[in-house]
Structures are given as structure tokens and as C-alpha cells.
Image: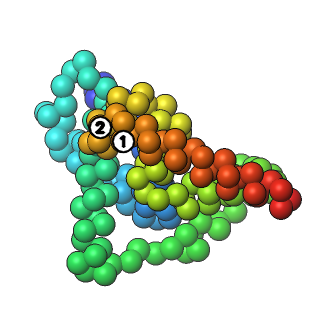
Amino acid sequence: MDDFQQDLVELLPRLRRLARMFAGGSADADDLVQVCVERALGRRNQWRDGTRLDSWVFRIMKNAWIDETRSRRRGGRIFAGDEDGGQVADPATPALETRLAALEAEQALMALPQDQRMAVALVLVDGLSYREAADVLDVPMGTLTSRLVRGRMALMASLGEVEKAL
């Protein structure tokens, strides 16, 4: 593998995490990652050395998700749900309490409107700077900041209610 391919492989966990923010289900997220990687490899001549590969690939993923969303609206396609394979046991699976806490956090994140969810995912989960995240989403910095603040507030409120219920 050359450096580009190696760097792309190293991005796979982050791509999968971001894809789950877009798609929600793990099957759709896997499909989105595959489309994204295929497009990145096919368009590698468009990437410029010295720029951040993650931002470039995240933008490809965002555009692929937009394409998929439009396609679904037109064709009414539905992929298989998590229940078709997400429940397979794995000996490396964390303890039940950890999984439940992670599930609650994921549900709170997925309940956010997509614009807020994407801002939170890019900045808080993937660690992009505000400028990089704004570039990936093609929005002004003020818009990104507003979405991020609203998303954080909604998450804190949602997770605070979850903790009170326990």
C-alpha cells in the first residue's frame, strides 16, 4: 500500500463513526463508508498533498450521504436494519452497563436534528476544528457554532434527564 492508501485505512474507524452519525444504523453506515472509500480511491488525483485527508474524505462522505438521501427519496429504498446482524455476540463486547450508557448517549445524539448531529460529530467526536468542520459542511463559521451550541445544549438536557431517571 502507498501512503495515501495507508492513511485512508487509518481513517476507517473515524469514517465509520461519522457514517453512523449520518445513517444511524450500522448496515447503512457500513454501506456509506464503502461508497466513501471507493470515491476517495477513485478521485485520489483530486486530493492535494499538504491538505488534511480526513477533511477531504469527510466531505466526500457528506456528499455521498446527500446522494443516498436523494436516491432513497426517489426510490423508496430501505436497507436492512441493525436487527439483522447487530445483535451477534462478540467476546470483546463491553459490560452491559457500559453498553447501556453508550446506547443512551448514541440515542441522544441520533435524536438531534441532522445539522446539529453533524456539527457535534465532526467537532466533538472526530476532533475537527470549527473551521474544518464548517468547510466539510459547507456552512459559515457562525452557522456551525450555532448548530454546535444548540446540539450540546440538547445533548446535556437529554443526558441529564436520562441520569435522573436512573
Q: Quadrant of the N terminus?
A: top left
Q: Position of residue 99 (x, y in %)?
A: 73, 54
Mark 1 Cα shell of 10 Å, populated few (<14), some (14-19), many (≥20) = some
Q: Are marks 2 and 1 in contact (CB under 8 Å)?
A: yes
Query: Residue placed at 13% from the left, 33% from the top?
Result: 45
| Left or right, 37 with reference to 125 | left
Vertical relation: 50 (above or below) 101? above
Q: Disc 1 designates what residue? A: 143
Q: Amino acid at mark 1?
A: Thr
Does residue 163 appear in the picture of this structure? yes
Query: Residue placed at 33% from the left, 78% from the top?
Result: 77
- The secondary structure type at the circle numbered 1 is helix
Q: Position of residue 6 (x, y in %)?
A: 36, 30
Does residue 9 appear in the picture of this structure? no
Quadrant in which residue 132 is drawn: top left
Mark 2 Cα shell of 10 Å, populated few (<14), some (14-19), many (≥20) = few
| Left or right, 110 with reference to 62 | right
Q: From this viewpoint, which residue is outermost toward the bottom?
A: 76
Q: From this viewpoint, which residue is outermost toward the right?
A: 166
Q: Amino acid at mark 2?
A: Pro
Query: Residue placed at 52% from the left, 41% from the top?
Result: 149
| Left or right, 46 with reference to 29 | left
- What mark, if any, has residue 140 been given in the picture? 2
The Cα–Cα distance between marks 2 and 1, rounded to whole angstroms, is: 5 Å
Q: Position of residue 46 (x, y in %)?
A: 14, 34
Query: Residue placed at 31% from the left, 26% from the top?
Result: 52
